[in-house]
Image: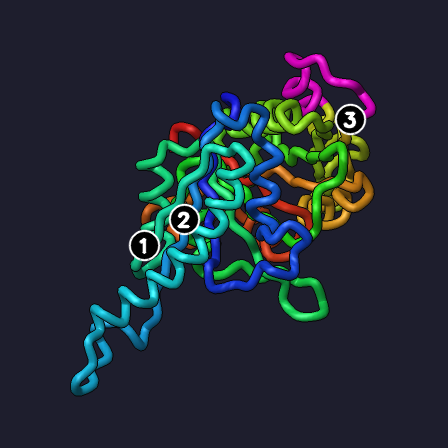
Amino acid sequence: MKKIERIMVVIDANEDFSSAPDGLPVELRKALRFVQDKQAAEIKLVSVGYEKYLGSSFHMIAVDYAALQKEYCDRLSASMQNLVDQLAGQGYNISSAVRWAHPRYEAIVKEAEDFKADLLIQHCRAYGKIEHHHLTNDSWQLVRHCPLPLLLVKDKEWGDPVVMMAAVDPLHSHSKPMQLDRQIIDASSSISGQLAGTFHIVHAYAESARPFAPAGTIKAEHSAAFSELVGGYNFDEANLHLIDETPVYALQHYSEKLNSDIVVMGAVSRSRFSEALIGSTAEEVLDYVKTDLLIVKPSAE
């Protein structure tokens, strides 16, 4: 994976960031961690506004909907410009754009592609006191349709150094393309280097899922496949983890043991007919993993 120098950050410009120590939303604060050279790197903020009551489906006498939409977007633009001015004053190469669109995710993907972004960042809001981060429909659609690496961030700040956990599946038991595991590893290695962090590689399997297999057979199969996958790299053995546990449980809980800040995983759309399916493991954990999630898509997809 090439160095990340063009970063697009989705901003909810309706949100109040004034309580943050630096006045910045957490997704933007994390984006700045990627910047090593303020002039070489380029950050673009995008806010996509839409309110159904201002849409064409609502008709009220003597209401100028075009004017109301412009007023709404102007408020978003003013909020975005405040962020741009603050960071531009610190030497960052930063710009912003506001769009009115529905569905929002389509406009976000188009902006990212037009910007030729290396990384797209979006925030996932926590759900009440249980710290459950339900993905919005826009976030799910970005996971399904965004062709570039997608970083879904939570409220917790990253540690120093940043710790990443790459989740791989070398036996492709979840119908992942063979090259995706190497893309996950390459992305983790590249980004951890850029962030001056560390990363672990985790492969989880569940021997109990095949109770009639001869004892030790399942572990041997997965161990051999895992060794073959990482054999072409020069990794510290302490950072390689083969776990006898379901992938869902491992992703939810082993990241806590490693105190990881970012879990890197792949997501695939299985067919045009069933776009909603993005891979069984991803479907089950995206809403529940408490760390940030970097979603990598197959390059050929």
Task: Identify residue type, mark 2.
Answer: Val
Pointer 3 or 2: first along the chain: 2
- What segment carries the magenta color? 224-240
Q: In this orientation, which residue lies closer to the viewer: 93 or 294?
A: 93
Compared with 268, 179 (above or below) is above
Q: Which mark is on residue 239? A: 3
Residue 207 in sight from this viewpoint: no
Pointer 1 or 2: first along the chain: 2
> Which residue was labeled with disc 1?
99
Give the image location of residue 250, x and y in percent. Answer: 73, 45
Disc 1 crowd rating (10 Å Cα; few below 14, some 14-19, many 20+) is some
At 39% from the left edge and 28% from the top edge, which residue is drawn?
A: 300
Distance Cα–Cα, label 1 vs label 2: 8 Å
Task: Identify residue type, mark 1.
Answer: Arg
Q: Is residue 3 left or right of residue 20?
A: left
Distance Cα–Cα, label 3 vs label 2: 36 Å
At 43% from the left edge and 35% from the top edge, which residue is drawn?
A: 148
At 67% from the left edge and 49% from the top edge, which residue is drawn?
A: 248
Count all numbered tags in the image, as a single digit: 3
Disc 3 crowd rating (10 Å Cα; few below 14, some 14-19, many 20+) is few
Q: Are marks 1 and 2 in contact (CB under 8 Å)?
A: yes
Quadrant of the snapshot with the C terminus: top left
Residue 229 in sight from this viewpoint: yes
Give the image location of residue 274, x and y in percent. Answer: 38, 52
Distance Cα–Cα, label 3 vs label 1: 43 Å
Task: Identify residue type, mark 3.
Answer: Asn
> Which residue was labeled with disc 2?
46
Q: In this orientation, which residue lies closer to the viewer: 44 or 184?
A: 44
